[in-house]
Amino acid sequence: MFEDPVEESISWMRVIFLTVLIVLVSRHFLFEPVAVHGESMMPTFEDDDKVMLVKIYSIENFDMIVFTAPNGVNFIKRVIGVPGDRISMEDDQLYVNGKAEAEPYLDKNRKLAEQQGLYRLTEDFKEFTVPAESYYVLGDNRLNSMDSRVLGFISRDSIVGEVKIRLAPFNHVGIVE
């Protein structure tokens, strides 16, 4: 008929304990919500946007990641080169393994730069090869980004996770591309 109040309390404590355990394990090993700070990824991400990182990932060109820089600060950037890629920039055109790559996420920033009398977002650099276990990353706001041009290559070990979902602001919630 009716359960013993002590047994019911123990049952509820088990449910609560298991729920907390699942949340903590998921947050530590699978997912992590983070806030974007700064303007280096504008307009893709604005200051104080909230995103969800996935901690089980396979990083590919143009994925967005969060990594810990040598100064201990976490940054969000776009992966331009993965291990073994040959990267170069000429006349604001990115080349990956000798192939010109379209970067449609830079269109708004290119228009803003032109309005300011600037015709390049990124200075030219000669071809180099991304070392093993490393990545070359750039911010989408190339005129205002501390990225691999300053920090150098990003080690695989410094990656916190891959950005997959925007959680806020509400009008931009969804899968990140």
Image (cartoon, helix red, strand yellow):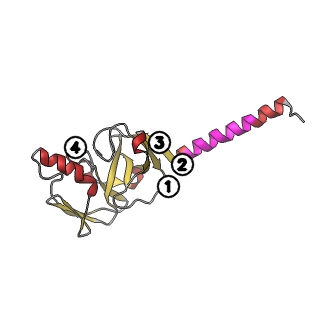
Image spot of residue 171 (x, y percent): 40, 42
Measured Cα–Cα span from mark 1 to mark 2: 8 Å
* Residue at (51, 47) in percent of width and height: 31
Q: Quadrant of residue 62?
A: bottom left
Amino acid at pointer 1: Ile
Amino acid at pointer 3: Pro
Query: Are the residues tagged 4 and 3 within 8 Å (C-beta)?
Result: no
Point out which mark residue 56 bears: 1
Residue in front for this viewpoint, 131 or 118: 118
Amino acid at pointer 2: Phe
Mark 4: give few (<14), some (14-19) or many (20+) Cα within 10 Å. Answer: some
Quadrant, the N terminus = top right
Going from N to C along the chain, the mark reached first, 1 or 4, is 1
Measured Cα–Cα span from mark 2 to mark 4: 32 Å
Assign a secondary structure to mark 3. Answer: strand
Amino acid at pointer 4: Asn
Measured Cα–Cα span from mark 1 to mark 4: 29 Å
- Label 4 sits on residue: 144
Measured Cα–Cα span from mark 2 to mark 3: 12 Å
Assign a secondary structure to mark 2. Answer: helix
Query: Are the residues tagged 1 and 2 within 8 Å (C-beta)?
Result: yes
* Residue at (34, 38) in percent of width and height: 37
The span shown in magenta is 12-26
Residue in front for this viewpoint, 129 or 8: 8
In the image, residue 100 sits, relative to residue 119, either above or below, namely below
Going from N to C along the chain, the mark reached first, 1 or 3, is 3
Q: Quadrant of residue 104?
A: bottom left
* Residue at (82, 30) in percent of width and height: 6
153 relative to 14 in the view: left or right = left
- Label 2 sits on residue: 29
In the image, residue 105 sits, relative to residue 38, either above or below, namely below
Image spot of residue 126 (x, y percent): 17, 62
